[in-house]
Amino acid sequence: MSNENKRYYRKQIELFLLLDKIKLWPSRTGILHGIRSIEKKGDFAEVTTHCGKTFQIYNSRNSRAARWLRNKWVSRPCKDCRIPEWKLEKYSTTFFTQHYGSDLRHKD
């Protein structure tokens, strides 16, 4: 794996910024879902996955989902979401570090 394929992001970034960038959601059962849309409503957001699930999330850097995405604690991708292989490969070559990488600033 060459260095240009690796992506580095800051470890403690807001969950909404991270989800906007990678468009993946880890469920509590360890399944990785593809995100179709994110509708922000203040500190909360409504997330819709490609398999049709809709739920509300809170913007937290230390949430279960944020930790699972950073540490890659997922078992398999969702069959119904049909996440493309290139997106799974891109996610697998993404690294989160404390003092290095993009901090994904707000788009104002």
Image: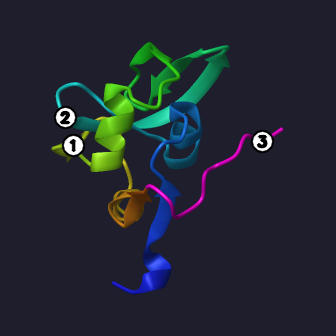
Residue carrying label 1: 74
Chain-order first, disc 2 or disc 3: 2
3D distance between C-alphas at marks 2 and 1: 5 Å
Where residue 51 sits, quadrant-wise, is top left
* Classed neighbour count for the residue bearing mark 2: other residues with Cα under 10 Å, few (<14), some (14–19), many (≥20): some
Q: Residue 34: x and y, percent? A: 41, 39
- Residue drawn at x 70%, y 46% is 105
Left or right for 20, reference 99? right
What secondary structure is marked by label 1?
loop
| Residue sitting at x 50%, y 60% | 99
Q: CA distance from mark 3 to mark 1?
A: 29 Å
Q: Which residue is mark 2?
A: 30
Alpha-carbon neighbours of circle 3 within 10 Å: few (<14), some, or many (≥20)? few
Mark yes or no: residue 82 visible.
Answer: no
Numbered range of the magenta stretch: 98-108
Mark 3 or 1: the one toward you: 3
Dot 3 falls on a residue whose secondary structure is loop
Q: Which residue is mark 3?
A: 107
Indicate left or right for 48 with 95 as reference.
Answer: right
Callout 3 amino acid: Lys
In the image, taking residue 50 as reference, residue 102 lies left or right, namely right
Question: Element type at marker 2?
Answer: loop
Quadrant position of residue 40: top right
- Kindly report the distance in space between the C-alpha atoms of the residues bearing marks 2 and 3: 30 Å
Q: Is the residue under label 1 in contact with that under label 2 (CB below 8 Å)?
A: yes
- Point out which mark residue 18 bears: none
| Rendered residue at 44%/16% (across/down) | 54
Quadrant where the C terminus is found in the figure: top right
